[in-house]
Image: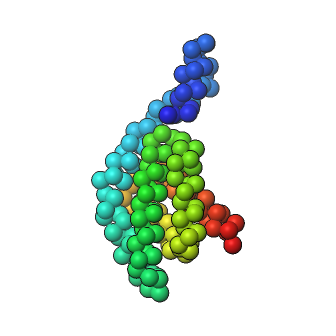
């Protein structure tokens, strides 16, 4: 579940943890509070966050079909949920294995990269407003991982 913690626990079974390993353990545990806080905010404010993002996307991309925007918003809603869980677990592989493999095909099929890019930028902007800096620091790498994966997968398919 927590790859870093699992490795440290396994190592501690055969010997005492070294100072470097204790530092890793301390860091892992100390950031858990920030990750939990960010997760709770994402969970509790999901509707208002995504409503604001959706309203702005419609204004910024009036030429796009509403159905396409709605579908891409739903995808980013799922992405954000998976990013939240990956953040809690502090596990980028979780995100890749659980979400990104199927999502690439969906984005390519809907040809919605420009909408996705816009949603990503607006989502990060909105999260900057609603999350504490520490929470944003915890979720941002996972959102960036998802966005980079989608961007690269779309670029490779062209």
Q: Position of residue 83 (x, y in %)?
A: 47, 51
The colour scheme used here is: rainbow
Residue 92 in sight from this viewpoint? no
Q: Residue at x 50, y 74 (%)?
A: 115
Q: Residue at x 52, y 52 (%)?
A: 99
- Quadrant of the image for the C terminus? bottom right
Residue 62 in sight from this viewpoint? yes
Q: Camera-side residue: 55 or 16?
A: 55
* Residue 148, image quadrant: bottom right
Q: Position of residue 67 (x, y in %)?
A: 41, 77
**Vertical placement of residue 14 versus 118, above or below:** above
Residue 67 left/right relative to 6: left
Q: Camera-side residue: 47 or 131?
A: 47
Q: Position of residue 4 (x, y in %)?
A: 56, 32
Q: Camera-side residue: 99 or 117?
A: 99
Q: Position of residue 109 (x, y in %)?
A: 56, 70
């Amino acid at each position: 579940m927590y790859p870093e913690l699992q490795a440290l626990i396994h190592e501690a079974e055969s010997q005492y943890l070294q100072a470097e390993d204790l530092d890793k353990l301390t860091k892992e545990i100390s950031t858990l509070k920030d990750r939990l806080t960010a997760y709770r905010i994402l969970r509790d404010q999901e509707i208002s966050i995504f409503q604001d993002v959706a309203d702005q996307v419609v204004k910024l991309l009036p030429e796009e079909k509403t159905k396409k925007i709605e579908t891409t918003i739903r995808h980013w809603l799922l992405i954000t949920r998976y990013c939240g869980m990956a953040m809690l677990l502090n596990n980028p592989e979780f995100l890749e294995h659980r979400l990104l493999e199927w999502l690439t095909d969906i984005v390519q099929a809907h040809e919605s990269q420009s909408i996705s890019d816009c949603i990503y930028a607006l989502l990060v902007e909105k999260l900057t407003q609603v999350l504490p800096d520490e929470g944003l620091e915890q979720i941002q790498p996972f959102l960036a991982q998802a966005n980079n994966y989608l961007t690269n997968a779309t670029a490779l398919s062209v």
